[in-house]
Image (cartoon, helix red, strand yellow):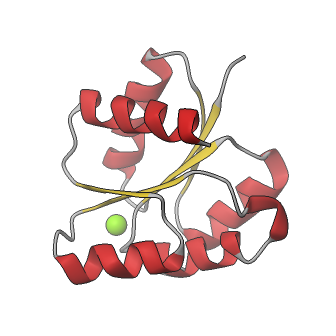
Amino acid sequence: MTKTILIVDDSNFVRNYHAYILEQAAFHVITAVDGSDGLEKLYRNGCDLVLTDVNMSNMDGYEFIRRVRSDQQYTALPIIIVSTESEAKDKTKGFEAGANLYLVKPCTPETILENVRMALLAA
Ligand SMILES: [Mg+2]
């Protein structure tokens, strides 16, 4: 069955890049431009996994993840952070917010696909 991935990123380029990689691998992709758009899309369409940026105006990735996790029906939804921030404190913050995995941009298509598949299998 086709899995739906929600990509949340304020960069047009990154959204398109990640969407292209995932669509080439036969995933169904939904995109959102920030955390609040991400929540809206999640509630409207649902998804099997979230790939989210951290630095976004309006609602950042940490707040977005905390809000997703605060909903009982999404406690087990796989969430992967893809961020330019590479320090341990950023990763810790991401995991504390509720992310399952943390990737540092830029990511190769292989890295994205491996981690998405792994997180879906673990879910
Ligand atoms: Mg950003």
Q: Position of residue 75 (x, y in %)?
A: 71, 64
Q: Is residue 38 left or right of residue 14?
A: right
Q: Give the residue drawn at x 42%, y 62%.
A: 10
Q: Give the residue drawn at x 72%, y 54%.
A: 41
Quarter holding residue 59: bottom right
Q: Is residue 48 left or right of residue 29?
A: right
Q: Position of residue 107 (x, y in %)?
A: 22, 42
Vertically, is 104 above or below 26? below
Q: Is residue 111 left or right of residue 118?
A: left
- How many numbered badges does the structure rendering display? 0
Residue 25 visible in rendering: yes
- Quarter of the figure with the N terminus: top right
Vertically, is 113 above or below 42? above
Q: Give the residue drawn at x 70%, y 65%.
A: 39
Vertically, is 24 above or below 29? above
Vertically, is 4 above or below 56? above
Q: Position of residue 52 (x, y in %)?
A: 46, 58
Q: Is residue 32 left or right of residue 72?
A: left
Quarter holding residue 92: bottom left
Query: Regarding ligand 1, which quadrant of the image does it lie in?
Result: bottom left
Towards the viewer: 100 or 63: 100
- Quarter of the figure with the C terminus: top right
Towards the viewer: 32 or 110: 110
Towards the viewer: 102 or 9: 102
Quarter holding residue 17: top left
Q: Position of residue 113 (x, y in %)?
A: 37, 29
Residue 60 visible in rendering: no
